[in-house]
Amino acid sequence: MFRKIFIVLICSLIIYPSFAQTAADLYNEGVKLEGDEKYKEAITAFKKAIEKKSDYADALYELGWCYNELEEYKNAIIYLNKAKDYEPSTAKIYFELGYAYDSDGNTEEAITNYKKALELYPEYYSADRNLGDIYYTKEDYTQAAEYFKSYVDGADEPDNGYYYKIGWCLNDLEEYEEAIEYLEKYEPTEIDDKAKKWAEIGYAHYKREEYNDAAEAYKQALEIKPSYGTALRGLGNTYYDQDDFDNALYYYNEAVEKDEDNSKELYYKIGWIYNDKEKYNDAIEVLLKAIAYDEKDAGNREELGYAYYMTDKYDDALYQLNKAIELDSKSKLGYYYKGLCYVAMEDKTKALEVYQQLKSVDEEQAEKLLNKINGN
């Protein structure tokens, strides 16, 4: 009797197998695993769901999403494109596909898909953000600013850092007043970011020739980060443009001391100021550094030639001034100072030759040289 019951039970198991999972069951299992960040196991579940239902767009989308999380972007692209084929009007598929293409280095396809997501759902502000980032990287700041603005103006809780990015873009686009508006909304917490904010505001004011506001902003940056080269250079430029060369020189020298790698372009201005102050030996020392930094800049050679001329080092002066003219055939100062060297050396013939050369470059400057040649 017992054997008969056992056989009946076995037969029942054969006829009525254990509960078989449907595509929906497998999908739900995948979603739970995905929520637990078990992406590989989730992928297995989603693939089983797709085996049961090949046009299961939701499962294809989630499968692509998991591959994006695992940074397997080529696989993500395959499954997300399949999901798109079955549900061509679902914005989130295009967004995720845009992310996969962008991460895989195909920015043009990324742009196409992000824009499609926005076409289907204009309030998809994350797509605005990602498009802005792409254009920002491409240095297309007009489009970057447009998408960033849409993102920060529309998203419920936008990443505050994008206010800085907008301000930076607008400064590059010479829209300084609007740049200040967005930069003032930027609320960083890190010291470096706080200093960057004020330096960027300082730059916007500086370009608008609002020198007092520029100086105040740059000084705010320096209070936060005293060695910040960008603020030191900006503050120096603010004073330089107002002919306040004492303050300009102070901040330029501070910038060179504390951030030399990014301040070497200041050697020329420092040398110019020393020449203006008749500190020619100091000018020579700095302008030699300027030439070491950029030996093909004619202005560096002109200013150094002038410093040598003023210290009666005519051979050195002529060498630098000839280099300036070689680099820039229209170097009116190169010709002018060269002519002055020959005047000082009492070589009127060569001075007149230089005068003739300068005349074809700048007649007004040539007349000044001729007056010097004639002792006027």
Image: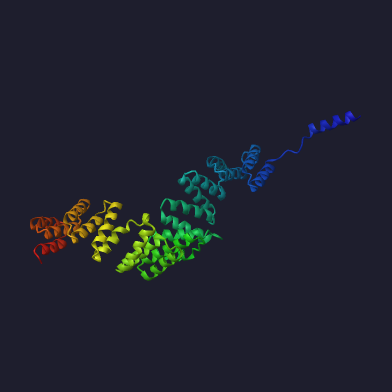
For the N terminus, the image quarter is top right
Q: Nearer the viewer, residue 227 or 150?
A: 227
User: Furthest-bottom residue in view?
Assistant: 212
Q: Position of residue 237 (x, y in %)?
A: 34, 64
**Residue 58 seen in the current view:** yes
Q: Nearer the viewer, residue 213 or 299?
A: 299
Q: Position of residue 333 (x, y in %)?
A: 19, 59
**Residue 233 seen in the current view:** no
Q: Position of residue 313 (x, y in %)?
A: 18, 57
Residue at the image position 43 percent from the left and 64 percent from the top: 221
User: Furthest-right residue in view?
Assistant: 1
Q: Quadrant of residue 72?
A: top right
For the C terminus, the image quarter is bottom left
Q: Position of residue 64 (x, y in %)?
A: 57, 43
In the shown orientation, is residue 181 left or right of residue 70? left
Q: Is residue 256 above or below residue 94?
A: below
